[in-house]
Image (tube, rainbow, N blue to C red):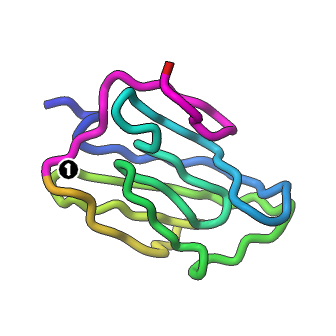
Amino acid sequence: MEPVQESYSLCGWVKKILSGGSQFWFAYGTSGYNEEIRPTDNGYFYTLSTYVDMSSKVTVQLGTWRHVCNTWSLTTRAASVYYDGLLIGSVTTPSGRKVGRDGYVVLGNEFGSYG
């Protein structure tokens, strides 16, 4: 079993400091997928390169700290998003798809390209 490839929980305290658009606070990309894991400060996120829009389910105010979590499991194929401890939504990811192992982590910004 490869724990990181088969499930993860990513949580952080996030404060929106710029109006408009989405700011990525974490990014993980691999040679095959630039958008493996990318949560934003306003409800948009990528899990296994699956784009999800939960922005209509959360109100984000400038300068306010929010606790944001993104979880995923290969077994259930469910990617879930939590804001301040409340589940705001889940999506189903592709069957059999695991998190790539050859990637890079970027904190506080978007993952632009591999290498």
Quadrant position of residue 35? top left
Q: Is residue 82 placed above or below 14 in the rendered structure?
A: below
Which of 56/13 is in front? Answer: 56
Q: Residue 112: x percent and y percent?
A: 58, 35
Depicted 69 relative to depicted 111: above or below: below
Using residue 79 as the reference point, say whether residue 15 is left or right of it.
right
The spot of residue 64 in percent (x, y) is 81, 63
From which residue to which does the magenta span run?
Answer: 96-114
Rate crowding at label 1 as few (under 14), some (14 to 19) or many (20 or more) other CA atoms within 10 Å: many
Q: Nearer the viewer, residue 86 or 75?
A: 75
> What residue sits 70% from the left and 52% below the top?
23
User: Vertical placement of 108 versus 94: above or below?
Assistant: above
Mark 1: which amino acid? Leu
Question: Which residue in the protein does label 1 denote?
Answer: 74
The residue at the point 62 percent across, 76 percent down is 58
What x and y, as percent, mark residue 85? 53, 66
> Magenta stretch mostly in which secondary structure?
loop
